[in-house]
């Protein structure tokens, strides 16, 4: 059985920072300590490097099946491990949509055959698949996804009676995209009347407004309280929404949780002039005041998880006029580097960052043996060089779509090693020919 010792690393795990070694034996972390020796082990000297658990990204769109001109599970998960993401949870708005157990299992098979990282998928709820949802085993996948607002993929769930039945009939985490459809449509018509289809991008956060977000998320939370559903609100983007969540109980006891995404913490509406539709997301990037409130809620634990909502589109698609340019952008390769810049600025501690990106997704979705540097856990581990400058450009972007909203940005940290189930899957720009990835298992009995 192959053994590897990572020596002299700065280990960041469970709110502690300490110097030490980690012994990997096969797929698992065998021992954590100091001065670990084994004559049969490969030695990696990690002096000066940060060792952290692999990131669990609970919201990605890898576009397979049906939209693979934008990306696929192989290309995007490959970019993910280069960015320190060792586990992904992919969303159901593909073509065909993941709204039957059969289609879910077909995607699981694609993951098994082609993914570079551990995988699970969301099962999509619709206005008419409640009976299929009832048949879904609670351990079959990461959870249920509801689009409670218009979104890419035409998966809007707007029948309130059906929504309540879904909330009442699943033990799984319900993850929701919350924007009010009527508010958005009315706003869009107003600006189309003034500008036609070529609406200036600066109006995107006004069309997909803070009110649209709050109206939908507050309604979903009220319903979750009524039904005692386990609700997770994806990509919170407004200051007002942060008031809906609590931080006076541990994550393990919460029935209602929240996520924020990298782009809502990095960009603001001041960036539309430079970035244009390359930072067009749903929900929209909003004001600097909203961004600051999101940071505050992340730090005080009203927001529980930090994810990407990685959603690639081709360069040609993104360069269309406003009404034709799709929302979303690629982020898995660059999220850790971007957020470590914020850590260096003093915006967030490294311990808190790892809690939100690694520990908490594992807790929230009850993922078995991942998300922590612990003996007996899978060796999903990332080494980061904290003093390496590099600039994002076309030559080092790994996404199939070939572009990034961070192009031209210089980062000062870089992932050097990514282990997936004990396999050194990525090392200084090189990918292992061996893949050793697994479908996620859960502690839900």
Image (tube, helix red, strand yellow):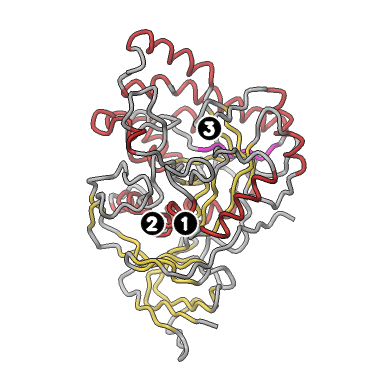
Residue 248 figure quarter: top right
Q: Secondary structure at mark 1?
A: strand
Badge number at residue 55: 1
Left or right for 109, reference 445: left
Mark 3 and mark 1 in contact? Answer it, CB < 8 Å.
Answer: no
Q: Earlier in the sequence, mark 3 or mark 2?
A: 2
How many tags in the picture?
3
- Residue shown at 64%/42% (left/top)? 123
Task: From the viewer's side, name the closer residue of 445 and 3.
Answer: 3
Left or right for 44, reference 183: left
State the CA–CA distance, disc 3 to disc 2.
26 Å
Extent of the magenta region: 229-234
Q: Is residue 256 visible?
A: no
Q: Nearer the viewer, mark 3 or mark 2?
A: 3
Quick one: quadrant of the N terminus? bottom right
Q: Secondary structure at mark 2?
A: loop
Mark 1 and mark 2 in contact? Answer it, CB < 8 Å.
Answer: yes
Left or right for 419, reference 171: left
Q: Which residue is mark 3?
A: 153
State the CA–CA distance, disc 3 to disc 1.
26 Å
Q: Is residue 194 above or below residue 380?
A: above
Task: From the viewer's side, name the closer residue of 109 and 134.
Answer: 109
Q: Nearer the viewer, mark 3 or mark 1?
A: 3
Disc 2 crowd rating (10 Å Cα; few below 14, some 14-19, many 20+) is many
Badge number at residue 83: 2
Q: Nearer the viewer, mark 1 or mark 2?
A: 2
The percent position of residue 354, horizontal first and vertical second, equals 45, 56
State the CA–CA distance, disc 1 to disc 2.
9 Å
- Residue shown at 41%/31% (left/top)? 326
């Amino acid at each position: 059985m192959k053994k590897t010792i990572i020596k002299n690393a700065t280990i960041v795990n469970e709110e502690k920072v300490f110097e030490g070694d980690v012994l990997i034996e096969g797929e698992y972390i065998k021992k954590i300590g100091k001065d670990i020796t084994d004559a049969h082990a490969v030695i990696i000297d990690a002096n000066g490097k940060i060792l952290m658990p692999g990131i669990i990204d609970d919201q990605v769109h890898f576009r397979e099946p049906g939209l693979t001109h934008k990306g696929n599970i192989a290309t995007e998960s490959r970019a993910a491990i280069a960015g320190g993401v060792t586990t992904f949870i992919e969303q159901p708005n593909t073509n065909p949509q993941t709204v039957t157990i059969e289609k879910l299992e077909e995607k699981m098979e694609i993951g098994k055959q082609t993914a570079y990282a551990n995988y699970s998928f969301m099962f999509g709820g619709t206005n008419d698949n409640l009976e299929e949802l009832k048949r879904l085993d609670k351990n079959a996948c990461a959870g249920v996804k509801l689009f409670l607002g218009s979104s890419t993929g035409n998966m809007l769930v707007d029948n309130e009676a059906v929504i309540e039945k879904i909330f009442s009939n699943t033990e799984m985490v319900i993850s929701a995209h919350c924007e009010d459809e009527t508010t958005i449509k009315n706003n869009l018509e107003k600006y189309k009347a003034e500008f036609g289809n070529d609406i200036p991008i600066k109006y995107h956060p006004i069309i997909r407004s803070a009110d649209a977000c709050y109206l939908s998320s507050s309604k979903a939370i009220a319903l979750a309280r009524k039904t005692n559903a386990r609700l997770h609100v994806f990509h919170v983007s407004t200051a007002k929404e942060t008031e809906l969540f609590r931080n006076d109980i541990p994550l393990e006891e919460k029935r209602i949780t929240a996520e924020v995404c990298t782009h809502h913490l990095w960009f603001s509406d001041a960036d539309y002039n430079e970035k244009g539709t390359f930072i067009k997301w749903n929900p929209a990037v909003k004001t600097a005041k909203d961004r600051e409130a999101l940071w505050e809620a992340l730090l005080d634990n009203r927001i529980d998880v930090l994810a990407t909502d990685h959603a690639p589109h081709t360069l040609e698609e993104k360069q269309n006029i406003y009404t034709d340019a799709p929302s979303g952008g690629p982020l898995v390769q660059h999220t850790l580097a971007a957020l470590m810049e914020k850590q260096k600025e003093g915006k967030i501690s490294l311990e808190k960052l790892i809690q939100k990106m690694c520990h908490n997704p594992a807790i929230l979705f009850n993922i078995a043996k991942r998300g922590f540097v612990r003996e007996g856990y899978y060796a999903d581990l990332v080494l980061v060089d904290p003093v390496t400058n590099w600039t994002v450009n076309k030559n080092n972007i790994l996404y199939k779509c070939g572009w990034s909203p961070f192009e031209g940005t210089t980062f000062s940290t870089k992932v050097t090693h990514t282990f997936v189930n004990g396999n050194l899957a990525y090392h200084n720009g090189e990918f292992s020919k061996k893949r050793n990835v697994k479908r996620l298992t859960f502690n839900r009995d």
